[in-house]
Image: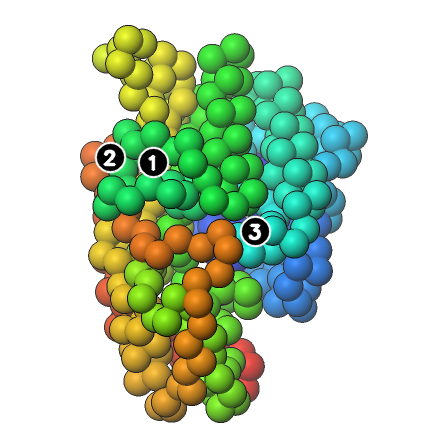
Amino acid sequence: MKRTFLVTGAAGFIGAALVHRLLAKGERVIGIDNINHYYDPALKEARLKQIELSEFSANWSFKKLALEDKHSLSEIFQSEKPEVVVNLAAQAGVRYSIKNPAVYIQSNLVGFGHILECCRHNNVQHLVYASSSSVYGGNRELPFHEKQAVNHPVSLYAATKKANELMAHTYSHLYNLPATGLRFFTVYGPWGRPDMAPMIFAKSILEKTPIKVFNHGQMQRDFTYIDDIVEGVLRCCYKTATIDSSFNPQHPDPSTAAAPHRIFNIGNSQPVDLLKFIEVLEDALGTIAIKDFQPIQPGDVVKTAADTSALETWVNFRPYTNIEQGIKLFADWYRNFYKS
């Protein structure tokens, strides 16, 4: 039976890819995005155009608005009656949060609060929302797993994502709202964000300008291909969060609850050295990078690595795209889209 999904951040990298998959499954999808200028809106418009041109677009509608606009958001919930909400809208970026904190407070905290209130008052059956691997902050135990405490964020962006998890848990506890939080690790692939390393590096390599390699290259990231991320999100959409019947309040598990709230890592589980990533990208583009080695930036962490065993158990899926496959697909798309 066709269900109605509301996807916020629908013009974003992950949001647009998820919308394609939901529509292909025959679902009705309402997309929301404010199309802000954090990065080139033309890329966001191009993603939306791809959705509009798809064979499934009859089940698609789009509303341009910000989550901070509570009145307009409430009207959409009341008129469209979504059964499942996937909240991917947020002000992204670790370094940007240091320079522009107020934007993060409004979008990631106030906006998310409005989403929770709308879900509460409109009989939403399941909320799936984006958290981030950045919540692990100063943790040094690798791989990161959901049972670790995440009480030491090193950026405001990370702090807002940790706050989202706490806010969602509260609504699950008070109002029995099923909610699943997904801690995304570094996502890459076609239609990616221009503020992230793969796009920045590809542009500089092809233009033969230096790329800034922070911490002198001594970094690792759990790079995860977009199709793998979307498959994991999709499966979580169809498996509603439930109460953990074995939850022990004397020894609480941070990833589950005595409420219908779950938290999962969603990553590749195979961290890649930054210099290795650059090498694979050089091979895919057929050009050698000019590297400008720099010290680590405020808010950055040296290594990320995801333990995804809990997600694998929950939805029976683990990523399958290795870095060589994913980077080739990304590089081919980049050359075609930017006519490089």
Q: In the image, what residue type sits under mark 3?
A: Ala
- Image check: 42 left or right of 180? right
Q: In what quadrant of the picture does the N terminus appear?
A: top left
Above or below residue 27? Residue 298 is below
Residue at point 61% right, 67% down?
43
How many tags in the picture? 3
Label 3: which residue?
92
Residue contact between numbered discs 1 and 2, judged by CB atoms under 8 Å: yes
Query: Disc number at residue 310?
Result: 2
x then y, percent, for residue 229:
37, 51
Pair 2/3: label in front: 3
Q: Between marks 1 and 3, how big is the CA–CA gap?
A: 19 Å
Q: Earlier in the sequence, mark 1 or mark 3?
A: 3
Pair 1/3: label in front: 3
Residue at point 45% right, 80% down?
292
Q: Earlier in the sequence, mark 2 or mark 3?
A: 3
Q: Between marks 2 and 3, how big is the CA–CA gap?
A: 25 Å
Query: Disc number at residue 264?
Result: 1
x then y, percent, for residue 87:
54, 39
x then y, percent, for residue 71:
78, 30
Secondary structure state at the residue bearing disc 1? strand
Above or below residue 79? Residue 99 is below
- Image check: 340 left or right of 30? left
Residue at point 38% right, 43% down?
138
Mark 2 Cα-neighbour bin, 10 Å: few <14, some 14–19, many ≥20: some
Q: In the image, what residue type sits under mark 2?
A: Ala
Q: Quadrant of residue 324?
A: bottom left
Query: Disc number at residue 41?
Result: none
Q: Nearer the viewer, residue 204 or 243?
A: 204
Above or below residue 174? Residue 70 is below
